[in-house]
Image (cartoon, grey):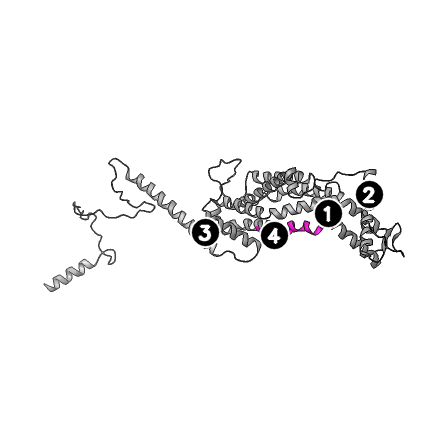
Amino acid sequence: SSSSSSSSSSSSSSSPNGGAPPTPDSSPAVKVFTDSDSPPSVDLPGALPTVDLPGALPGVDQSVAATQSTDVVSAAASSVDLDQLSVEFLSTLPSSWWPSSLCEYLIHQTYEYAHCPYYQSIIACTLALRFAMLPIAVRTVRNTSRMQHMNPELKAVQARVEKTDMNDPKNQKIYREQMQALFKKYDCNPMRSLALPLVQMPVFMGMFFGLKNLPDKIPEILAVGGPQGLPSILGSDFGNLAIADASFILPAVTAGTFLIMIEVGADGMQTNTDQAKMMKNVMRVLGVASLGFTSWMPQSVFAYWLTNNLFSLSQTVVLKSPALRKACGIWPPPKAAAGEEGKNEIKEAWAKVTQAMKVEEEDQNLDKKVVVKNGPKLLDRKPRKGK
């Protein structure tokens, strides 16, 4: 029996396939599920998980309800991600004391505090900075208006100085005294006109470079930071501040407001001099050229730039009000002199300066100097009593 069993086992182990296991039965037993059993879970790629909706009405497609629920959850998750990203970015600011980093901190802090769209945060910070610089701007316009009225007398002094020997310390002293007398008379100084550019330039450069670099730091936030729901014009997407304006509308409007600002601001300013006219023409060329070299910039830059131009334009128009100019001590622009009228004005101005210097010398008894045609000379005479 043992030999027969061993022979049967050896015969069964040998097969034409060289010892391969036998082929399983092609008809396996089918399992029958009862009511107590749960259906097996099948993982299909891309399939939505089964969502149990309590209180679902009969006849409602459960898959549609599950899809809508998933969309709401995804939107909430993306909102949480943006908030987290915003908080993390704010924790890194200000990264330095450069104006661009400080402007980024100001804008993003306003965005976090006000919970407003990003473009509104940019506009609010721009207006706040311009209103803060408004007193300096008013004092600059006031100083410029007085400098315009002083120019004829200043030219007379300069013309007189050209005929004298300025290497003489005595002549230099007289020239300085005449200049100081003019500045005191008109309550102005050329150095005061430099205050506004010195303040505006760091702010402008900080806002410009800060907003230009923001799309590289927080593109997800700026992608939804613009006004939403605006129609697309020539392929534009104003809702995305991280990209350039494909329609060139914002660059064109910004360049146009800059040119209008130059034309309106030049009215009443020093346009009667060759230097002022040349500067005005240079600004016109820059305004037209800006349309080309700013068209590739992100729309976040134009949210600031356009707001800044509109504020400057409004400020120039408002400061033309006679009542407001009088309240701020801004003098009306002088009448342009031409031909003989200009020569007579210079002569009259020089006569005023000479008379003022004579009275001042006699009152203070300073070195007994007077100004004559051939330059300053020492006169051996006693000062007059009285004026």
Q: Quick one: label 1 or label 3, which is nearer the N terminus?
A: 3
Q: Quadrant of residue 167?
A: bottom right
Q: Which residue shows up at 83% across the image and 45% down it?
A: 351
Q: Nearer the viewer, mark 1 or mark 3?
A: 1
Q: Residues within 10 Å of mark 1 (few under 14, many from 20)?
A: some
Depth order, front residue of 284/175: 175
In the rendered image, residue 212, in percent from the top left (x then y), is placed at 55, 49
Residue at mark 2: 348
Circle number at residue 186: 1
Depth order, front residue of 79/181: 181
The amino acid on which the numbered mark 3 sits, given as a three-letter code, is Ser
Apparent side of residue 256 relative to residue 110 in the rendered image (left or right)? right
Residue at mark 3: 86
In the rendered image, residue 115, in percent from the top left (x then y), is placed at 45, 46
Residue at mark 4: 202
The amino acid on which the numbered mark 4 sits, given as a three-letter code, is Pro
Range shown magenta? 189-206
